[in-house]
Image: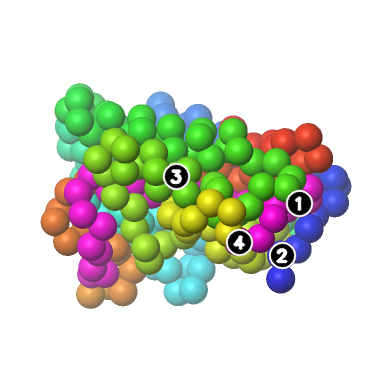
Amino acid sequence: MIKLKTEREIALMAEAGAVLIECFARLERFIRPGVTTLEIATLVDETMAELGAVNAEKGYGGFPGAACVSVNEVLVHGIPSSKKVLRDGDIVSVDLVSQKHGYHADACRTYPVGIVGESHLRLIKETEACFEIALALVRPGIHLGDICHAIEEHARSCGYSVPREYTGHGIGREMHEDPYIPNYGRPGTGPLLQAGMTLAIEPMVMEGGNALRVLPDGWTAVSKDHRYSAHYENTVAVLEDGAKVLTR
Ligand code: MG
């Protein structure tokens, strides 16, 4: 069941979103060659605590870390580690969920580390473009499948693929609510969007094929062909006259 939010609830989610905006501002300055993925997660955890938010990802479903930090061929759910040192040319996705006053916000950014090759910069840029194209469609009365299709279409037009196993989702009092929002779909299918829906729209885009495997740690999802992936996500509220992004 899709839970519609009141204006007040959306305002509370925007407060959780503001915490993520500050986390990303600090990460932007912090991420460089030599930094470990554990240091990234620690910075996020301390920032959320300082701003009075709950770091909702920490320990979620048994996740052994304070943030999902996914490097290069890792698509999602990278576990922070003091042994994983970022190097020149890497790309790193940092996926965060904050909770304030009982409401969640979820967002992800992919950062280039040092000097990154043109093809990987393009991957990051086009993943963000997938989100913008989807966002431009969001308003009451369109089908959810229209958004999903638009993301897949843009990724494919760039020669990329999208995963089948991981999707966006509704969000609110729970981190994951209905509906699921795949990065693929058919136009004119799925639920109609309504004002008050709050959606985590999150294009995950793979440079090569979309075959994945999960490492023996039970979390880390990597591309089978070892090619890189990027991930860009925001929490979006559907309003009477369009959409509002709560996490930037
Ligand atoms: Mg997320």
Q: CA distance from mark 4 to mark 1?
A: 12 Å
Q: Nearer the viewer, residue 92 or 4?
A: 4
Q: Furthest-left residue in view?
A: 225
Q: CA distance from mark 3 to mark 2?
A: 21 Å
- Please provide the residue range marked out in magenta: 190-215
In the structure shown, which secondary structural element does the residue marked by tag 3 occupy? helix
Q: Which mark is residue 190?
A: 4
Q: Which mark is residue 2?
A: 2
In the structure shown, which secondary structural element does the residue marked by tag 1 occupy? loop
Residue type indicated by callout 2: Ile
- The earlier-in-sequence mark between 1 and 3 is 3
Q: Nearer the viewer, residue 148 or 228?
A: 148
**Is there a contact, CB below 8 Å, between mark 1 and mark 2?**
yes
Which image quarter is the C terminus in? top right
Residue visible at 43% across and 55% down in the picture? 184
Q: Nearer the viewer, residue 77 or 201?
A: 201
In which image quadrant can residue 68 be found?
bottom left
Q: Nearer the viewer, mark 1 or mark 2?
A: 1
Mark 4 within 8 Å of ligand 1, using the beta carbon: no
Q: Nearer the viewer, residue 216 or 156?
A: 156
Q: Position of residue 245 (x, y in %)?
A: 64, 37
Instruction: Please indicate whether residue 202 sits to the left or right of residue 69 in the image.
Output: right
Residue 91 drawn in magenta: no
Q: CA distance from mark 1 to mark 2?
A: 10 Å
Q: Residues within 10 Å of mark 1 (few under 14, many from 20)?
A: many
In the structure shown, which secondary structural element does the residue marked by tag 2 occupy? loop
Vertical arrangement, residue 192 with respect to residue 89, above or below:
below
Q: CA distance from mark 4 to mark 3?
A: 15 Å
